[in-house]
Image: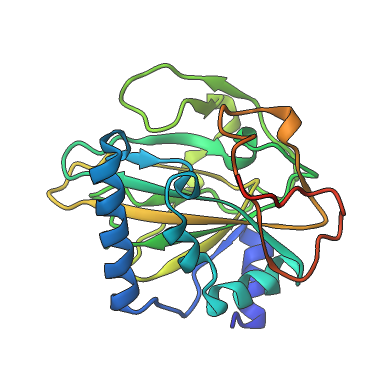
Amino acid sequence: MLSTTQIDQYHQDGYVVPDYRLPSETIDAIKIDHARLIERYPQFSDYCGALLLHDFRFLNYARNPDILDMVEQLIGPDIALWNSSLFAKPALTGTRTPWHQDGEYWPIRPLATCSVWIALDDATRENGCLRFIPGTHKRRKLSKHHHNDAKDIALPLELDPEQVDDSRAVDLVLESGQISLHDVYLMHGSEANTSDNPRRGMTLRYMPTTSVYRRDLNKSPVDDKRTLFLMRGEDVSGQNDFRVR
C-alpha cells in the first residue's frame, strides 16, 4: 500500500514510485509472453500499443491485487482497465519518445487514468528511462500538441516546445521489477536508447468508472476494438461497454 506521504506526492507531482517490487518470476513471465507476442507479430518488436487486442495473457498481470490496491488509493474503488501497452527499446536502436501528455491520445471523458509503468529491465539514463516534469498535471488541461512525422520517435504527437520546461525534468531511474504510477495529464517523454542494454516496460491503464471510454470519438483505429475490463467495484457512469471484442 502507498503511504500517506506517497499519495500526497502523487497528487503534488503527478507520479509516485512505490516501495514495491514485482517478483522476478513475474517479470520473467512477462518477458516470455512478450517474446511469444513478437514471434507471432514481428511488427511489435519495438512497441505494441494494445496488448490485449492480441493476447489476453497480459490481463493476468493487470489483476495483481497489490497493484490494484495502490491504484484504488489514487482513483477510488471503482476501476476499469482499458488498455495495456509494451514499450521495448532495443539496445542501441531504441527511439526517443517526445514530450507529451497521454490524454492527448485517449477517448476518455472526463479524462482520467492512472498509468502503472512496470520496468522489465533496469531503466537508466543511458537506455532511455522515462522523464517526468513534476506538477504539470495540476492544470487538469491538455496543452497544445503537434504531429511529428519523424522516423526516429516512438509516438507521433509532441507537445509544442513553448509548453515544455525540460529544465525541471526528473529521470525515472528504476530497477527491474519496480513500478511507477502517473497521472493522465503529466508531461513526460524519454530519450533514445544509446546503451548496450534493452529497456522494456509494460503499462497498465486504469480509469475510474466515473469516466466513460468513448468509442465514438475514434482517436485511434483501435479505439472501437478494445475490451474494457471491470477490475473492481461497479460502473458508476452506467455508460461503459464491457463486451468482449
Question: Where on the picture, by quarter, is residue 139?
Answer: top right
Number of numbered discs visible in the structure rendering:
0
Q: Is residue 151 left or right of residue 18?
A: left
- Residue 102 image point, x, y percent: 58, 41
Q: Can residue 175 be seen in this view?
A: no
Identify which residue is drawn at 23% across, 45% down.
39
Q: In this view, does 145 lie to the left or right of 156?
A: right
Identify which residue is drawn at 47% across, 55% down.
203
Q: In this view, does 171 lie to the left or right of 161?
A: left
Identify which residue is drawn at 53% across, 25% down.
161
Query: Which residue is at the front of the view, 182 or 132?
Result: 182
- Residue 104 image point, x, y percent: 63, 34
Q: Is residue 42 above or below residue 241?
A: above
Identify which residue is drawn at 60% across, 48% down.
186
Q: Residue furthest left?
A: 196
Query: Which residue is at the front of the view, 142 or 31?
Result: 31
